[in-house]
Image (cartoon, rainbow, N blue to C red):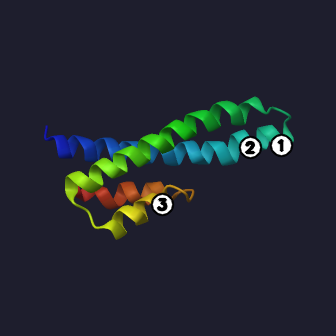
């Protein structure tokens, strides 16, 4: 498998998992913390989400350089990581490039 294609596939998969972790953090862990008096839910899910976010950013930079993406595209994909559900659109956008 080509290194660029494996990096792109890993980035796509990370985008999906990072998007799911955001939804779990906002829709499950935070309500458990504030309404269920279970602050450890945010601690653990937040830690996992943070690692996935770092991985997403690292792989974004790797793809940016490997594919010679325009800065505007890399910036758009970065901003998508900050918005719930947007990483799913990143994955969908990249699906045809693999």
Quarter where residue 94 is shown = bottom left
Q: Position of residue 71 (x, y in %)?
A: 33, 66
Question: Are the residues at dot 2 and dot 3 in contact (C-beta closer than 8 Å)?
Answer: no
Query: Closest to the observer: 95 or 5?
Result: 5
**Placement of 12 over or under 42, stated as above or below:** below
- Residue drawn at (49%, 62%), measured in percent from left and top? 79
**Placement of 92 over or under 52, stated as above or below:** below
Numbered circles on residues, count: 3
User: Callout 2 environment at 10 Å: few (<14), some (14 to 19), or many (20+)?
Assistant: many
| Numbered mark located on residue 76 in the image | none
Q: Is residue 64 left or right of residue 41?
A: left
Query: Closest to the observer: 31 or 11?
Result: 11
Q: Earlier in the sequence, mark 2 or mark 3?
A: 2
Q: CA distance from mark 2 to mark 3?
A: 21 Å
SS state under label 2: helix
Q: CA distance from mark 1 to mark 3?
A: 26 Å
SS state under label 3: helix
Q: Earlier in the sequence, mark 1 or mark 3?
A: 1
The answer, for residue 98, to whether it is visible in the render is no
Residue labelled with disc 1? 34
Question: Are the residues at dot 1 and dot 2 in contact (C-beta closer than 8 Å)?
Answer: yes
Q: Position of residue 2 (x, y in %)?
A: 13, 41
User: Callout 1 environment at 10 Å: few (<14), some (14 to 19), or many (20+)?
Assistant: few
**Placement of 82 over or under 28, stated as above or below:** below
Look at the image and tell me in which quarter the N terminus lies: top left
Residue labelled with disc 3? 80
SS state under label 1: helix
| Numbered mark located on residue 30 in the image | 2
- Residue drawn at (77%, 44%), measured in percent from left and top? 31
């Amino acid at each position: 498998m080509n290194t660029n294609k494996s990096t792109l596939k890993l980035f796509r998969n990370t985008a999906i998992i990072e998007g799911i972790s955001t939804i779990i953090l906002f829709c499950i862990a935070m309500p458990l913390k504030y309404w269920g008096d279970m602050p450890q839910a945010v601690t653990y899910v937040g830690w996992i989400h943070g690692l996935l976010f770092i991985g997403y950013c690292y792989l974004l930079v790797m793809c940016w350089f490997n594919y010679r993406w325009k800065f505007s595209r890399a910036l758009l994909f970065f901003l998508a990581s900050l918005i719930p559900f947007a990483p799913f659109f990143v994955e969908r956008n990249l699906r045809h490039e693999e």
